[in-house]
Every structure is written in structure tokens, then in C-alpha cells.
Image (spheres, rainbow, N blue to C red):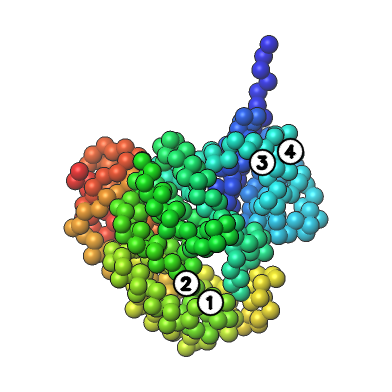
Amino acid sequence: MKTKNKQKVNIITMGCSKNIVDSEQLMRQLNDKYDVSHESETDDADIVIINTCGFIADAKQESIDTILNFSDSKQKGKNKKVYVMGCLSQRYKEELKKEMPEVDAFFGVNDISDLLKTLDVDFKKELLGERMLTTPKHYAYLKISEGCNRRCSFCAIPLIRGNNISKPIEDLIKEAEWMVSQGVKELILIAQDLTYYGMDIYKKRKLAELLEKLALIKGVEWIRLHYAYPAAFPMDVLKVMAKYDNICKYLDIPLQHINTDILASMKRNIDASKTKEIVLKIRKLIPTISIRTTFIVGYPGETFSQFEELKKFIAVSKFERLGVFTYSPEENTSAFKLKDNVSAKTKEKRFSEIMEMQQLISAELNTAKIGKIYKTIIDRKEGNYWIGRTEFDSPEVDNEVLITSKTKEVIIGNFYQVKITSSEDYDLYGEIVV
């Protein structure tokens, strides 16, 4: 008797790494019944599931365009079903239903069990912690909590995903151990706010304790921290970071602005002096640290002098990694009530000014690395180069190390000692020495 071929499911992920984790968990739940792929280059999937982003205007538009593209494919007979899940669907479900009747169903961020039921799949609790990894097998994201208790004026995430819900430490250790068993060497810790971890279930901050336990797992070579909140930053985290060689000297800490009045309007619970103080403390405790941060320009009421204050702060601080967003109003946030009185032209001008500043800072910092040797993980091969990263760089968003493929055959996912021979604004070139 012939076994019926499994239907094909293609999952498309929009937005941040937290969405990637959600998609990977869904894929594992579906894998026994369906032939599951992630962002397949072929368009012959029977079922397409789009995991959307609803955070900022550009990301929302990208999600909408993707839905429309696959709806068109369905109407042409290439796909049988199109489902939409994630943040955009959570936030605008009723509006989307009216505007996109060709989509078979919409599911919010907490509706995974309903989506599985629609696909005739029973939710398996025993698979919690297991995923079909979509990243290169040597690194993966470990989401330690969901939601956020902060109420930043510009951010809709708490409206979409609710308050902070931490995962128990024992569950995260089990998940990390499973990842290592799959070949993962680098754990990238993610949450909307890492520093709030544990406050809900343990009644105190537990990130430092979690870090220490993860660092002791055999096979974990690197642990990287994304998305820390600056106000009341738990300094014990830095002590643990300094203690363990396998905790990367890297911190993603979005500061958003430096002007005290802007920070107050943003509801960031911190002022200019405290912001400067935390940056100095971090650098004092971890002198070799690479700080990644982000800023918002064009926030309602941002004056020329307030923007100049931000530029001066960036020039003095010389952040190793920096990103900039132009402000866009988000419905139902407190900033949405403010007059969006900085013109689009001015926002773009300010964006460009800061990125030009950062380009020079990055070039200067990279030049200082020439002649030094760094432990480097190899992510992929591209053209004539092996592409790697040091502990000071996160995948896809930070600097890379380019190693000529003619020098030596290397193994993707392995670590090598690499001597930096030259640099560009955002990339390093090197040769393997060990």
C-alpha cells in the first residue's frame, strides 16, 4: 500500500529574531504531518503560512506586500491555502479580514494551537523546547521571555504581545541543551527586555543566574545578549560576563536618545546623566566590550539642539555598533497623541547625519584591530571569501571578517584564530593563523 505524499507547508517569517523562534517552534509541531520548509525558493507549497511583523511602518508594509503576493499566487493556483499569523495579524486581525478575504484565516501571536487545529495537528507539549532551526546550525536564538512590562511611548509591542512572561530557568537550560545536541555552539539570548527576566515568576531579576547556568553547559562556546533595557540595568550581569570566557563581551542595549526631555516623553525611566553613567560603568567593568545601540531621530518635538546633543553623545561614546530609526507614529501608543511635527525630510537628514558619523567611528575602530588576532566563527562561504565573525559581532546585523578561500580550507561553524590584515568601514579582512 502506497503512503500518501505529505502536503508541503512553506513558512515565511517577517520581522525580528523573536518571530524566527516562533516560526521554528511551529515548524517542529507541523513536521510529523507535513513536508515543512522555511522561505522555500520554490512556489509549489500547498499551504503558505506568513508570520508577520507589526512593529513599525516599513515592517508592516513589507508584511502586507508579502500577504498580497502569496494571495495572488493562491488565485493563480500555485498555492491552495494562505494563513497569516504573528504581530500584524494580532493587531489588525479584523481589518485584515475585511481587506484580504482571499486569506483563509488570520491568527494572533498566542493562537498557535488554533492554527495547528486548523491544520489538523495536535499540539504536542513534549516538543516544547524543540524547533526546526532555520539559522545555520552553529548558532540559534534562545527566547527567554515573551512580552514586555515597559510602556515606552513609541512602542506597540506590549499592546501586541502583552506583559512580560519569563520562561523558567530549568526549561531554558533544557532548551539550550537540546540546541547543543543539534550542533549549536552560539546561543543568542533574546527578549523584548532581557534585564527584566525573572521579575514575574521569581520576583527578582534573574538574568545573571540564568547566564551563569547557561555558561556551564558543555558545548556552549558563545553566549550573546540582545535587547537590554538601560534603566536600572542589573550590574551583576556584567560580573558574570567578566567571569566566563564563553559569554561574549557584547551587549545590545537600545538607548533611543540622550536628551532628558525626549527620554521623559519616551517614558524611558532614565535621564541623560544616568544614561551616560551606565555606558561608562559598562565600559569600566568590561573594557573590551562591544556595545550595540539604537536611536530614534525625528521623535515628536525633537529640536535642532536636542538632535545636536544626541550627535555629540554619539561622537564621544563611539559605540561599536549603532542603528538608527526615523520616528513613525504607532496607533494606540502614548506618543501617537503627540503632534508628529518633524518633517519627513528632516527625519531623513538626521538619519543620514548619524549614519555618516557612525561610518567614520566604525572605520576608526576597525583600523585599530589591524594586526590583532581574534577568535572567529565561520558562518558561510561567499564568492572568494569565508565569512566569519568575532565575539563582538552578531550575525546579519554587525561587522564580518572576510577570509580568502585560497589561504586554507575551513569548516563552516568552526572557530579559528584569525589575524586581521586590513579593514573597511564595516568589515574586516584576515587570515587564519591557527
How far apart in space, not on screen, are marks 4 and 2 (Cα)? 42 Å
How far apart in space, not on screen, are marks 3 and 1 (Cα)? 42 Å
In the rendered structure, are the residues bearing label 1 and label 2 in contact, judged by CB atoms less than 8 Å apart? Answer: yes
User: Mark 2 sits on what residue?
Assistant: 232
Q: Amino acid at mark 2?
A: Ala
Q: Secondary structure at mark 3?
A: strand
Q: Residue at x 43, y 74 (%)?
A: 354
Identify the disc placed on residue 48. 3
Which part of the image, by quadrant, shows the C terminus? Answer: top left
Q: Toward which corner of the image does residue 369 lie, by quadrant?
A: bottom left
How far apart in space, not on screen, are marks 1 and 2 (Cα)? 9 Å
In the rendered structure, are the residues bearing label 3 and label 4 in contact, judged by CB atoms less than 8 Å apart? Answer: no
Q: Residues within 10 Å of mark 3 (few under 14, many from 20)?
A: many
Nearer the observer, disc 3 or disc 1? 1
**Upstream in the sequence, badge 1 or badge 2?**
2
Q: Residue at x 26, y 37 (%)?
A: 409
- Percent x, y of residue 236: 39, 64
Identify the disc placed on residue 269. 1
Identify the disc placed on residue 14. none
